[in-house]
Structures are given as C-alpha cells and as structure tokens.
Amino acid sequence: MSTPSSTDSAEAYATWIAPQASLVVLQPTTLCNLDCSYCYLPFRKKRLEMSVEVTQAVADSLAEQQPGHVTEVCWHGGEPLAIGPEKLAALMAPFEELRRAGRVRHSLQTNATLINEPWCDLFIGYDVAVGVSIDGPADLNAERVDWAGRPAFDRIVTGIGKLVERQIRFSLIAVVGEGIGRAADLLDFLTGLGPTSIGLNIEELEGVNTSRSQPAPERARAFWEAVFAWSAQHPGVEVRELDRLAHYLRTIRGGERESWEAHRYDPLPTVAVNGDVVLLSPELAGIRDEYYGDFLAGNVVTEPLSEILAAAHRLPYVSEFLDGLAACRETCAFFDFCRGAQAGNRYFENGSFDSTETNYCRASKQELVRALAGITNTTGISSSTRSMEEAT
C-alpha cells in the first residue's frame, strides 16, 4: 500500500476530490426494523439516535460553504423513519433557514414500512425527496424481512400506497439478486408502483455483507441487455443507470468532453449518530480495520466539515483511493465513462483502496456499456463511443 508525501497527497486530492460536499449523508438512527439478509450495516439492531447538537453542527458547516452552493442532506439509516417524525423534524430544524434559502435540500431513503400520515406531512412540509427500497414483486423481495423473519413486502407496498395517496413523488431502488434473470418482470412491477425513477443496484459485497456470491459478467451483461430492451419499449420510464450512460453520451456528443473529464468526486461526508465523519463511502461507517483503523476523518461537533475536508488527504485510505483512481485512469479502458471504481467496493472486495477493478465495476459499469455497445472484448469506451451514440 502506497505512502505518498503530504504535498503529493494534497495535490492529488485537489485534482480528484471536490472542495465542497454536494451530498452529506446523515444517520439519524442506527436502528432498522428490518433484517434484510444482504444488509451491510453493522449496528442495525441497536437504537442509537442522533442529537440536535450534531445536526446543528452540520448545518453550521454547510452555512460556511459558498452561498450559491446547494447541498443535498440525505437521511439514511438504519431505517431513518425508526426515529419517529417528531424527532426527525427536530433534527431537520437547524437546516430550515438554509433550506428556505435554496442552499439545502432534503432526501431520505426508506424501506417504507413505517410510512403513515404524520410522515407524509413531514415529507410535504420539508419538501423531502423520498427514495424507497424494494426489490420487486413478493418473491424477489423475499430477503427483506423483519427481525422475526416475516416478509416485509405487504408493508412496503402499503407505505408506497400512502405516498401515492398524498401525491408525494418518490423514486425506487431495487437490489438485484435473484431478479437478475427477470429484468422485464422486475421493471414491470416497479413501474406499476408509480415512481419518478428506478435505480437498479446489482448486489455488492460491502459492509458486513461480504460472503454472498456475485453474478458472473456474462449474466450481468444479459441483465443489462434485457433492461435496454425493456426501456426501448417504455421510453417514458427513467432507469437511473441508463440515464447516467445517456448523459455521458450526450455530453461527449455535444463536444463537452472537458466538462465531463473535469468532474471531481464528491467527498461524500457520512455523519454518524454521534457526529463522527467518514468520507468517500457511507458503507465504511462503523467498520474497523487493523490497518486503516475506524476510517474516521473527524467529528463535526468538534470541528467543521471544512476543516475535516481540508485535512482529508492525510488519511491513509483517502490517499490510497487517489492512487487507485490514477491507476484506473492509466489501466482501464472504461475509465472515460465510469471515472474509477467506488472506494467502498475497492476495500470490501479487494482489501485496499489503491486497487483498481472490482466486481462492482464489471457488473454495474463495464457490462452496462457492453450491453449497449455490443462490445465483446476489452477495447472499452474510448474506441466505441460512436457505436454507443448510434445505439442511443
């Protein structure tokens, strides 16, 4: 594992990582009312809750960012609704001035089982962008169960129904495991629930979910081919992964390659219930490692995010991640599109951050491109942009 100088790390950090966060993940509670078999969260059975002191410190930090900068504050558990609407409203209160000024917007990812009228009132009152996790029809959602082992499917669908009744827009995210061979069935079902967009996460090894089998590249490619075929017949449905690839193609085709290549990673601060901050990957929160320690970059109660981010290049895992990005750029034909493997996937799959290719890369990026472009070798995106543009 590499140990570059502090100056080199600072320069690399400024090259690869944005100076301000555009997305901050907050963990209002560690508790989750479900026990999904693939969950990566280590403390989901414990009820630890965030205090207003922590959210006030985060809000103060965001107020220091440039006035024109907009930050998404994403409430993510555990199950964030397990804290209750009154407590979450209290945690949101310090952000209200920033929200009303257009400098902060709220989002929330939920399993939807606890949605009721008070929650809908909160979503409307604070203009919360709601994301719901559901893996498809009942048989594909079977791994989402409560702590007694009871299926959560009916409760999830009921919660989604509440959103629909109140005309609250929502997106869906599905973890694709057993459904990888049933793309059309999966998308038909998800579309029928009425979301604004659909995200498809092929199951990953991360957090405490480190032993389940991963799909072979050929199977992932067949899945994406089926998704493209379905999408061609349903042009009004936004599928997140296809939309991202289309955005890349439009940018390149429009002669804006420089703007695409100038993109820098969001530092992605994730704030735990006690104010502890990890960077680059929410999945690192609560994880300990003999070499990397606890991955903490600081605590927002004792130092503002600006200071935490300014010193981030000194963290071994951050410095190694920057080396990994540089290695991806030099060695991977798909870098032009994907811009480098995710930090958490590098660590949980390969055991280090300066590694390059991961199964996540292959299943969710490379095979997505190959499915569109008809690529059957490793020549990658740079040599096949024209065929992909024609395919779209």
Image: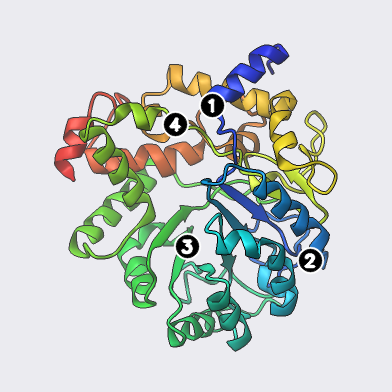
Rendered location of residue 344, percent (x, y): 62, 40
Which amino acid does the dot numbered 4 rest on? Arg
In primary-sequence order, the first of circles 3 and 2 is 2
Query: Looking at the image, is mark 1 or mark 2 nearer the viewer?
Result: 1
Indicate the quadrant containing the N terminus: top left, top right, bottom left or bottom right.
Answer: top right
Task: Give coordinates of residue 35: x percent, y percent.
Answer: 68, 68
Label drawn at residue 174: 3
Q: Residue at x 34, y 58 (%)?
A: 239
- In the picture as drawn, the residue positioned furthest to the left comes out as 390
Q: Position of residue 178 (x, y in %)?
A: 46, 61
The residue where tag 1 is placed is 16
> Which comes sooner in the sequence, label 4 or label 1?
1
Label 1's element?
A: helix
Q: CA distance from mark 4 to mark 3?
A: 23 Å
**Which mark is on residue 390?**
none
Mark closest to the chain's N terminus, 4 or 2: 2
Q: Which residue is mark 2?
A: 45
The kind of residue on which mark 1 rests is Trp
In front: mark 1 or mark 3? Answer: 1
Quick check: 389 above or below 177?
above
Q: Is residue 160 left or right of residue 50?
A: left
Report the amino acid beneath label 2.
Lys
Instruction: Say which residue appears at 22% left-offset and 29% top-offset.
Output: 384
Residue mark closest to the camera, 4 vs 2: 4
Disc 3 crowd rating (10 Å Cα; few below 14, some 14-19, many 20+) is many
Residue found at the far right of this picture: 302
Circle 1 packing at 10 Å, graded few (<14), some (14-19), many (20+), is some
